[in-house]
Amino acid sequence: MQLPRCSRSGDIIEYMLVPQWWMDCKEAGRRSVEAVRNGELKIKPENHVHTWEYWLNNVQDWCISRQLWWGHRIPAYKVVEPSVPAEKCNMSGEAWVAGRSEEEAREVASRMFEIPEKDKIVLKQDEDVLDTWFSSGLFPFSVFGWPEETEEFKAYFPTTLLETGHDILFFWVARMVMLSLLLINKLPFKTIFLHPMVRDSQGQKMSKSKGNVIDPLEVINGISLDGLIAKLHAGNLQPKEIKRSETVLRKEFKDGIPACGCDALRLGLIAYMRQGRNINLDLNRVVGYRQFANKIWNCTKFALDKWAIDVDGKGTPFVPNGLQMISTGKEKQNLSTNSYLIDFTDLKWEDQWILHRLSVACERANSCFEAYDFGDVANAIYNFWLYELCDVYLEAIKPRLQPSAQSSPSSGEKGGENGQNGEKNLTNGHADAGTKAEKIRDMRCAQEVLFACVDRGLRLLHPICPFLTEELYQRIPNSPSKFESICISDYPLPVLAWTNPLLDVSMQQLQQIVGHFRSLLAALEIPPKVKPQGFVLLREEAVAQREFFTETAATMAILAKLKEVQVITDQPPEGCVSDVVSPHVTIYLRINEGVNIAQTLEKLKKKRTNLLSKLDGYIKKVNEPNFDKAPEAVREGALQKKADLEKELQLLEAAIENVTPLLNKTE
């Protein structure tokens, strides 16, 4: 015989049958299912509707008694005196009544059991308390003063949205709905949004005994490994559990947890919303979002510097005029004295493209918010800030926003093509701006578009990162449309006039070309200080885009970190390695200058050997008989790493194949 014992105290557990209070849930369950079916109550994501119907169509009586000291005491009273006739008692021979107070219960007992002398009735309240879920099920209306008809109750009940975890859909959410329907005959809310369950990086449920619980405050403020272990020992875990938990901590957080801030944690969790029913929280991703927040800070700091440029040499400050002046391209509005009239056609290709991408980001964010796809909201805003605004647009406009751009020498003057103040450098490869007024307007265009991007970009991000965006919003220049605080500002909407899908397609091709240049440079391990010459060979259908690629060649060189890029329609000079971008576009890098080809080839072959060794290890790992039994996160990680190594090996083989002929020519 084995005695059951409490895992914490070691006390013997003795099972006892005791009377309990129960609630009949069949009618309330039926009404709750019907509310979802007829659309009165919506559940997001909708795949949880099946779970809702399964539970409530098969709902059983609910035991609401708990033998605890803490909780809402059950409002049930046993009649101790006088004696109640047996036919009016329950199966245990007891007479019970319910009431909001002992006085109310005494009134009920007097009527129910026909006891005229109420003062002689002696009651004893049940010592049991209500199930926690019953008490919390009253939350939607009890907080507003129910059962009293308070002003708050009339104004705020029912609410609009409930957000909670899917793991308590039945325990809490269904109970709130059932109790609200029974007690008030109304649904407590219109929509239920269920977020995934947060687990550790290995997909395990967080548990104190496992030592894998992540405290949000520790992620926000940071904590050392010693601090984590000290906190573990200060708890009430058993020595065996402490030892196991300490092992996990030393493995998972050997350097402690870096301070990431509240916004990075919020962004990380929301970005994880695309993962499904569970969030396998990897703190390295949260650290990555902290770096993203730093990127936004630096981007805004860059913009503040550029807005402070004395464009016309008269000390005229930059005053953003909103986007009315570049909203349609058909109107020129009278602006303030310190502003310049700007037509949409005055905007350079990079200005028009970033406004298009900003409008796309606004449309995506708004539609995803409405659909409760918060992970896609975060992804759309993240991509706009990082990959479009910072990586492309800022680099493209840097030459236009040089402080001396408005007074730079003309194309034929000293400074020339490669001079520091040369016209070609300062205008980013665009046609000669001509007059000083045109140059000033060109700079003003860049400033206005940059302001539009930063202003709207901050407002897009604000619901996710409120602290960072409020701080930066207060620093950007005041405009006629600026709000006192970002938290009361309008959420940005898409602008139809900015839509330019044809330019967007061309830019996608440009970015694809830049990506291939960068991959080729990385594969050849060419150091950053060496900037080779690049060529873009266009064939057949791609020749029609020669004008666009020629106009954007200087920007291509900046983004790819090359000396220059030339657009050609015939074969490039000798000493080049190539990479095929598409059937009609091929890129070339001229590496016969400034690059030791023999040394480069030797490095590539050594790297291939190391890569093959790593790949072989992962191939063996995924082919092990027990691989399918490993945790899902481990399996996905191994398969992804194997795929990445195979792709890297493919690029490396192509690079070796390209460089080998060059070595033969030099020997």
Image (cartoon, rainbow, N blue to C red):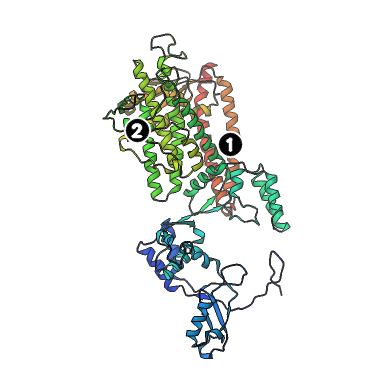
Residue 279 or residue 434, whichever sits in front: 434
| Mark 1 Cα-neighbour bin, 10 Å: few <14, some 14–19, many ≥20 | some
The answer to whether 440 is drawn above or below residue 512 in the figure is above
Q: Which residue is mark 1?
A: 612
Is residue 580 visible in the rendered structure shown here?
A: no
Choose the circle earlier in sequence order: 1 or 2.
Answer: 2
Which one is nearer the viewer's eye here, 450 or 479?
479
Q: Which residue is mark 2?
A: 323
Residue 4 place in picture, x, y as percent: 69, 71
Residue 206 coordinates in the image, percent (x, y): 60, 55
Q: Secondary structure at mark 2?
A: loop
Quarter of the figure with the N terminus: bottom right
Q: Residue at x 52, y 78 (%)?
A: 103
Tell me if 266 is positioned left or right of 337 in this view.
right
Residue 292: percent from the left, percent from the top? 52, 37
Tell me: residue 423, above or below residue 560. Answer: above
Q: Is residue 144 above or below residue 331?
A: below
Residue type at the position of mark 1: Leu
Q: Nearer the viewer, residue 32 or 429?
A: 32
What amino acid is found at the position of numbered circle 2 in the picture? Leu
Cα distance in 3D space between marks 1 and 2? 54 Å
Disc 1 and disc 2 in contact, CB within 8 angstroms = no
Pick the quarter of the image with the C terminus.
top right
Q: Does residue 441 appear to the left or right of 263 in the view shown? A: left
Badge 2, how many Cα within 10 Å: few under 14, some, many 20+? few
